[in-house]
Image (spheres, grey):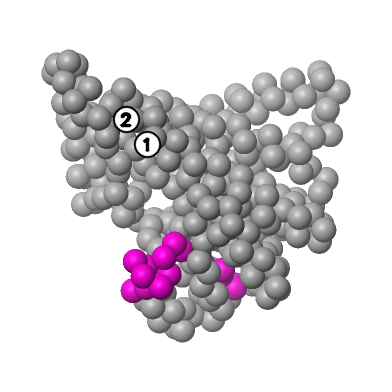
Amino acid sequence: MSTPQRILITGTSSGFGWVTTLELLARGHTVLATMRDLDSRNADNAERMRKEAAQRSGHLELLELDVTDEASVNAAVAAAEENGGVDVAWNNAGLAPMGIAEGFTPEQFLRALDTNVVGVQRVNRAVLPGMRARKRGLLIHTGSTMGRIVWPFAGLYTATKFALEGLVESLAYELSGSGVDVCLVQPGAFATELLEKIDGPGDPARLESYGPLAERPDTFWGPFMEALIKDGPPPSRVAEVIAELVELPPGRRPLRRVVDEMGVRSAVESLNRAASDVQRELLTDAGAAELIVSTD
């Protein structure tokens, strides 16, 4: 087994975060599992996680963290640094607004951006000083295949994941040579609790004039979501990929990793390769070839 790491994860109360926490604990790592409302709304989840951790060889530290609150993020990371630092930070917390874009209020869009993009910036800013000082570390981000391809009736979610793509790749350039690796995992559709927490339009009256098209998001996504909840691939596959990235040697981790079993992996990997070729050419022509990061 590789050297045990101290891994901070956002959004561990369910879904990818929950399953991956257990996978990493089983591999002997220390997981700094973060949730909101540890003493109230997520108290039961926290207790369940403690019981699961007791059956595994790793060590669990539960921390209160809300990615939309800078003070909360800084306090959690400060506590982690006092107890041994953060070797790996996985930005996993996220929201999934789905529906016709015009029906979402600006406040809903801001909330999604705050969680899916600005929250990442808060966490990275908190952990990077320690990582850069130690000249080692790993930042992992949960993107999406929908950060590369565009489906209808998912504009707000797609926008946040496209934004994350740009933020993460730029960060990878800026941290080249620092000892800090940067990765973006691009999951496809998996059977997680997020499917039951999808945020719909907050102003449905705005969509009445769309006529029959107003019902199209339900007919487009509904059957797919039902089938996914019933028979979709398990999130454990994403957990395995996260663990693999953690345990790869520093400097050997790919910038992007597609994890999909629903038929879009090849398309997304093709887009990744094409974008990588363009970026490599542009940076080389600009005299910045030393910033190019591995995509393999």
At label 2, counting other C-alpha atoms closer than 10 Å, the crowd grade (few under 14, some 14-19, many 20 or more) is: many
In the image, is residue 246 part of the stretch drawn in magenta? no
At mark 1, the secondary structure is helix
Q: Extreme bottom residue here?
A: 54
Asked whether, in this view, residue 13 is left or right of residue 3, the answer is left
User: Can residue 50 be seen from the camera position used here?
Assistant: yes
User: Which label was assigned to residue 108?
Assistant: 1
Is residue 260 visible in this depiction of the protein? no
The percent coordinates of residue 45 (x first, y second) are: 36, 71
Amino acid marked by disc 2? Phe
The answer to whether residue 198 is left or right of residue 116 is left
For the C terminus, the quadrant is top right
Residue in the foreground of this view, choosing between 108 and 137: 108
Residue in front for this viewpoint, 57 or 105:
105
The residue under the point 19% across, 44% down is: 226
Asked which secondary structure carries label 2, the reply is loop
Tell me which corner region of the image, top left, top right, bottom left or bottom right, holds residue 158.
top left
Report the Cα–Cα distance between label 1 and label 2: 6 Å
Residue 217, percent across and down? Answer: 22, 29
Q: Quadrant of the N terminus?
A: bottom right
Q: Which residue is mark 2?
A: 104
Rendered residue at 34%/66% (across/down): 41
For the residue marked with disc 1, what is the amino acid? Answer: Gln
* Residue located at (22% from left, 22% from top): 206
On the image, the x and y values in percent for residue 258 come to 51, 42
Total number of numbered labels?
Answer: 2
Whether residues under marks 1 and 2 lie with C-beta atoms below 8 angstroms apart, the answer is: yes
Tell me the magenta residue range.
29-45
